[in-house]
Image: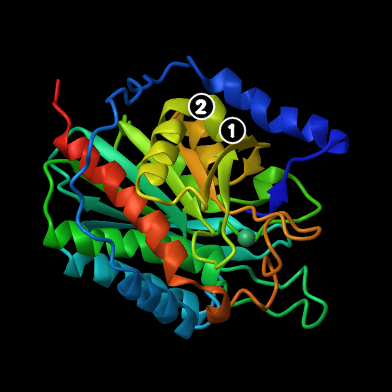
Amino acid sequence: MAYVLIGALLVSTVFAVIQPFLMSIGGPKPTPPPPTEPIVKVEAPPFNADSAFVFVQKQVAFGPRVPNTPAHQKCSAWFANEFKRYGLSVISQKFEATHFKGTQFNAVNIIAQYRPELPRRILLAAHWDSRFQADKDDKNKTAPIDGADDGGSGAAVLLEIARTLAAHPIDQGVDLILFDVEDQGDDNGEPETWCLGSQYWAKHLHKAGYMPYSSVLLDMVGAKDARFMKEGISMQVAPQTVDKIWALASSLGYSSYFIPETRSGITDDHVFVAREASIPMIDIISTPNEGDDPFGRHHHRHSDNMSVIDKNTLKAVGQTMLAFLYGFSQSPKS
Ligand SMILES: [Zn+2]
C-alpha cells in the first residue's frame, strides 16, 4: 500500500476506487451475513509478542523480499514450512505478475488453511513482499527496503496466530493468506499497479465459491508509533466488522492504538478483494500522521527496519485478533 486518498485533488481517484467497488456489492456472488454476535467476554489465549517479533526478524534476515530475488524465494519457502509445522495445510499459489516498469515477476501467494474441512471460515490476510525501492528516502532511493513494518509485521502476526491455533485449537475454520507483490506499485500511477497478488487471488480463488464469514487485512501493524483509524473503504464494506474489532481492542485496553475515528480510504489489498471477489475485507493499517507522511516517517524508507518494530504494538494487534477469532469460536452456531 502506498497511495492515500486525501484532499480535493484526489476526489476523482477516490471515486475511481470506491465506485466500481460499490457496484460490486449486490453482484452475482453471495455476501455472507454480517457478524452480529454481541461482544461478550472472550477467552482467548495470550498473544506472544516476543515470538511475533522474532518472526519479523527472521523475514528481515532473508534480505528485502522483492520478487525475483533469492531472498524472496527463500522467505516464501520458509513461510510455507512454518505454517505446515503448525499443522496448517498450505497452498503456494504461483503466478506471474507484470511490474509497472515491465519486469515479469515470479510471484507466490501463500494460503494457509486451519481446519480446511470446516465450512464456516474467517480470513486474515497480509502482504509479505517488501518494496523494491526507498522512494521516500533522501538517499539510496533506488535500493530496496527491509520492510520490517511494511510487510514483515502483518505476516509475523499471522504466523504467530497460526502457532497459537496449533497450541489452542478452536472449532472454527481460519484461512491465513500472505499476498505477494502488494508493494511494488507506482506512486504516481494507477491503483492497479499495486496489490498484484491480491488481484490475482481474487480472480483465482483457491476454492471455487470461497466466501469467508469475516475477513480482515493487516498492514503496517508493528511500528512503535502505530495508530489505527477506521479506514473509509472498510467502513463502506463491513462496518460491523470494523466496529466489533475496535470495540474488542478498547475492551482489552488498546484504545490508544485503535482510534474510533473514520479516515479516508486507502488503496490496499482489501480494495481488490472486495472489488474482484465481492468479499467484504476490512483493513487494519497504521496511519500515525506524522509530519507530511500519513503512513509515518519510516514508510518506504530505509528506516523501515527492525528499529521501528515495537512488541507492544504487535501485542495490541495480535491480542485483538485472537479475541476476534476465539470469540467466533465461542459464539453459538446457527
Ligand atoms: Zn508499502
Q: Which structural element holds mark 1?
A: helix
Determine whether, in the image, residue 124 is placed left or right of residue 230: left
Q: Which structural element holds mark 2?
A: helix
Which residue is labeled 1 in the image?
A: 233
Q: Position of residue 26 (x, y in %)?
A: 48, 14
Determine whether, in the image, residue 161 is placed left or right of residue 260: left
Badge count: 2
Give how far apart the Cα atoms at labels 1 and 2 are: 6 Å
Q: Position of residue 215 (x, y in %)?
A: 38, 38
Camera-side residue of 235 and 200 = 235
Circle 2: residue type: Val
User: In this rendering, is residue 36 above or below 133?
Assistant: above
Camera-side residue of 106 and 138 = 138
Characterize the local packing of mark 2: few (<14), some (14-19) or many (20 or more) Cα atoms within 10 angstroms: many
Circle 1: residue type: Ile
Which residue is labeled 2 in the image?
A: 237
C-beta proximity under 8 Å, tags 1 and 2: yes
What residue sits 31% from the left and 29% below the top? Answer: 209
Characterize the local packing of mark 1: few (<14), some (14-19) or many (20 or more) Cα atoms within 10 angstroms: many
Q: Position of residue 110 (x, y in %)?
A: 36, 58
What residue sits 48% from the left and 16% below the top? Answer: 27
Q: Position of residue 111 (x, y in %)?
A: 32, 54
